[in-house]
Image: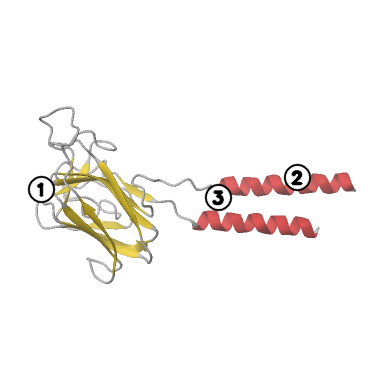
Amino acid sequence: MKLLKTAVTALVVSVSISTAQAAPIVLDFEGAGDGARILEFYNGGTDSYGNFGSSKGVSFGPNALSLTTGNFNDNPSGRTIMFFLSGSAMLNYAAGFTTGFSFYYSSSTSALINIWDGLNGTGNLLASLNLAAQSSLNCANPNTTYCNWTAVGANFLGTARSIDFGGGVNAIGYDDITFGSATAGDTGNEVSAPATLGLLGLAMTGFAFRRRRQA
């Protein structure tokens, strides 16, 4: 009986861990309007064209645009990317995220991306990503300006709440922005709670069968 309680307790702890661990969040910008300001598209609201996205708790400053048409090709996913024409693109994640941050980019200039633990680029600097110009490298079509996409990412300690996409005005596209992982596009491989509960049920059945045989 003691062995059974120990095994069940261990599996219950496993269930608790699996439900507490959130998978990384990936923003691919699909569904946002061509040339629209992204704004609250990923925060339970809409972009500037009135398109609703999924509620991820992520807000974008007015300079961040979604772009479907243009000189960008061979995108990592779908057709839509993030772009900006003035200032810098500020991203706020009020609830905060940990572990890592990553994305794909295509750029004709260099830029610096800063990860902060406060909103609107305030507080402590947790990590920085230096982007190099690489947009036209190895393009099959010589007339294509942006075809080369590079994945970059950083791990950090602490809780991040904002990203400043500084520099590169009208020269950089971003896609598959990923929170919670230093690997761009990572959606995680966690075991779901229902699956873990299923294992719990099978284990209890197995122990019950053993007890009947022993009896």
- Tell me what residue is drawn at x 66 percent, y 49 percent: 200
Q: Could you tell whether 193 is left or right of 207 in the image?
A: left
Q: Secondary structure at mark 1?
A: loop
Q: Where is residue 110 shown, x and y percent of the image?
A: 15, 51
Label 1 vs label 2, nearer the camera: 1
- Tell me what residue is drawn at x 9 percent, y 54 percent: 86
Q: Quadrant of residue 136?
A: top left
Find the distance from the CA under tag 3 to the CA under tag 2.
20 Å
Q: Could you tell whether 133 is left or right of 45 in the image?
A: left
Q: Quadrant of residue 125?
A: bottom left
Q: Secondary structure at mark 2?
A: helix
Q: Which residue is mark 1?
A: 170
How packed mark 2 is, by other alpha carbons closer than 10 Å (few <14, some 14-19, many 20 or more), is few
Q: Which mark is residue 193?
A: 3
Pick out the residue farthest to the top. 140
Q: Amino acid at mark 1?
A: Asn
Q: Amino acid at mark 3?
A: Ala
How packed mark 1 is, by other alpha carbons closer than 10 Å (few <14, some 14-19, many 20 or more), is some
Pick out the residue farthest to the right. 215
Q: Where is residue 100 shown, x and y percent of the image?
A: 36, 56
> Considering only order in the chain, which callout, 2 or 3, is on the residue closer to the N terminus?
3
Q: Where is residue 178 shown, x and y percent of the image?
A: 33, 50
Depth order, front residue of 109/63:
109
- Tell me what residue is drawn at x 33 percent, y 46 percent: 184
Find the distance from the CA under tag 3 to the CA under tag 1.
44 Å
